[in-house]
Image: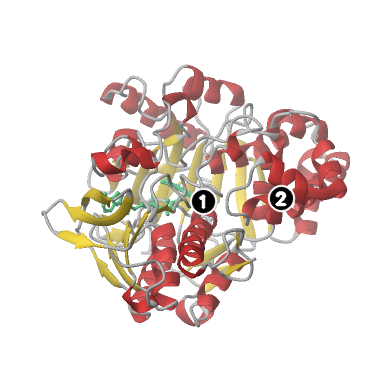
Amino acid sequence: MASPLQHRGEHHVVVIGAGVGGLVSALQLAARGLSVTLLEAADAPGGKMRQPLVDGAAIDSGPTVFTMRWVFDQIYASAGASIDQELQLNTLPVLARHAWSAGEEMDLFADPAQSRDAIARFAGPAEAARFVQFCRQAREVYDTLEGPFIRSQSPTLASMAGELGLKGLAVLAALGPMSNLWEALGKHFHDYRLQQLFARYATYCGSSPWEAPATLMLVTQVELDGVWSVEGGMHALARSLAMLAERKGATLRYGQRVAGIKVDGGRASGVITEAGEHIAADSVVFNGELSALGLGLVGDAARRAAPPLTPSKRSLSALTWSLHAETTGPFRLDRHNVFFQPDYAHEFGDIFARSRLPRTPTVYVCAQDRGDPATTSTPGRDRLLVLVNAPAQDGHPLNESEIDACESHTFSLLARYGLTVCRTPQNCLRTAPADFERLFPGSAGALYGRATHGWMSAFSRNGARTRIPGLYAAGGSVHPGPGVPMAAMSGQLAAATLMAHLDSTSRSRRVHISGGMSMR
Ligand SMILES: Cc1cc2nc3c(=O)[nH]c(=O)nc-3n(C[C@H](O)[C@H](O)[C@H](O)COP(=O)(O)OP(=O)(O)OC[C@H]3O[C@@H](n4cnc5c(N)ncnc54)[C@H](O)[C@@H]3O)c2cc1C
C-alpha cells in the first residue's frame, strides 16, 4: 500500500459509481493529478440522471429540474473548464405550472415580480404580499445555512451554532421552535393551495412537509433563484462531467459492478469486481447508496464503514412513467407541471404511515421539450416523465395490482385536469420502487437517502469520511444531501477530504467548500 504522503500521481483512487457525486469526485481528483479509475455498474454515466430509450426517444427519467447553477460553474472552473463551453444551459422563464383542477392554474416565474403578480391574480393581493414576506424569510434561511451547513464538511449542532452567530440564530428562532415546514408555511399563506405548493419542496429531499423542519424552506429559495434546461437533457450533464474527467486523465469503465471493497490493516486497499478482477487502490470513494456498505452489498470487510438506515428513516421513492406520447386536451403543458389534489396530508399519511401508494397522488409531469424555445420535439409527440411519490420498499412490497390502480388514478387525474396522455405498452416505460432498488442497490427504492424528518435529521447524515480509513463516501445519501447540486457538492467534499488527508501536515485543518475546492 502506498503511503498517504507519496507523490500525487502515484496515489491511485478507485471511485465506485458514476452518479453525479462520483463523477465530480473523479474529475476533481484527476484534475489534481491523482491516478483515478472509476467503475460503474451501468453502461452509461449519470446514475439516477439516466436517460432510457423509449419508443426511439431518449427520455430524462431521473432529475429534471436543474438548479444552483453556481455549484457547477465552480466545479467546471476548478477543473480549468467552463460549463458554458461544455454545455448549453438555458434559463427557463416559467419555473413550474401548477394546477388544482381544470382551469385552476398558476405559474411561478423566474422573475419574482411576475410570480407576485400571478399570485395576486390567483389568490388576491394580500396573499401576494405574504408571498413577498415568505420569499424574504426563505432567502434569510438559505443565506444563514449555506456556509455553516451546506458547504461545511460534516456539520454538528455545536459547530453550526458556533458559526451562525447571533444574527443567524435569530433567523432560525423566527421560524418557531421546532416547527415543521407545513406549520411554518401556514404562518405565511392563508390560501391552502399556496401552502401546498411551497410545502411540496420538502419532497425534493424525499420528505413529508409535516415532518420536515421549517428550515427546508431553503429548497424553495434554491428554485426561486432560477431553473435551467440542459440541451440534450439532464443526462447530458453527466456525459459532460464524464468526458471532462477523462480529459483530466481519469479512466472510466462501465458495466463494472464492484462486488467487494478490500480492507488491509484496517485501511481500504482496493476493490474486486463482479467479474473477479482485483484492482488495488490507495483510497476508495463510494458513490453508491451509503446503506449498501452496512448491508454488506460491497463485501463484508466494508460493513463497518457506515451502518445501514433503519426502514423508518428512508426517504421517498417514486413511481414513474417515461413516455414518448401524443397529448391532447386544453391543459397547456409547460416544461415542469404539477397537478395537486385537495387532500395533501393523506398523500404523506399513505406513504410514510401506511407504507402504501397514495390514493390521492400529486402528479408531476416533465415535458422536456416544452418551455424552452431552444429545443424542439417530434411533431405531435412529447417526451414526458410522469412521477408520483411512493414509499420505499422496506415495508411490504407493492404488488402489480396496487401499482396498476395508482397508474389509473394518476392518468385519470391528468385527464380530469385537461391533459390526456395517449400511452401504449410500446411508448411507456414504468419504473416502480422495486426497480429503483435494483438500479441503486441498498436504497430499498428510496431516492434521496435519509428523509429529512425532525430538526436533528440533517445532522445525522454521514459526511465524506467513513469509519474505514481510506474509504470515502459521496452522493445524495451523504451530507449535504440529495438533489443534483447537493450530490455534486458531496463529491467535492469527498475529493477535498481525501486531498486533505493526503496533503495534511496539520491534524486540526478543517475542510470546507468555497469557490471550488479548498481548505481552511
Ligand atoms: C425520478 C427522480 C427524480 C429526481 N428529480 C430531481 C430533480 O428534479 N432535481 C434534482 O436536483 N434531483 C432530483 N433527483 C435526485 C437526484 O437525481 C439525486 O439526488 C442525484 O442524482 C444522486 O446522485 P448520486 O451522486 O447520489 O449518485 P446516484 O445517481 O445514486 O448514482 C450512483 C451510481 O453508483 C453506481 N453503483 C452503485 N453501486 C455500485 C457498485 N457496487 N459497483 C459499481 N457501481 C455502483 C450505480 O449504478 C449508480 O450509477 C431525482 C431522482 C430521481 C430518481
Neighbourhood count class around disc 2 (C-alpha, 10 Å): few under 14, some 14–19, many 20 upward: many
Q: Amino acid at mark 1?
A: Gly
Query: Is 178 positioned to the left or the right of 16 in the image?
Result: right
Vertical placement of residue 158 versus 269, above or below: above
Would you say 394 lies left or right of 72 here?
A: left
Q: Which residue is mark 2?
A: 145
> Which residue lies under the disc numbered 1?
483
Image side of residue 485 versus residue 26, left or right:
right
Counting every numbered tag in the picture gives: 2
Q: Could you tell me which residue is drawn at 72 percent across and 51 percent down?
A: 142
Label 1, label 2: how far apart the Cα atoms are: 17 Å
Q: Quadrant of the C terminus?
A: bottom right
Determine the residue located farthest toward the left in the rendered image.
276
Specify the quadrant of the image occupied by residue 334.
bottom right
Is 51 displayed left or right of 107 in the figure?
left
Q: Relative to 432, is 79 above or below? A: below
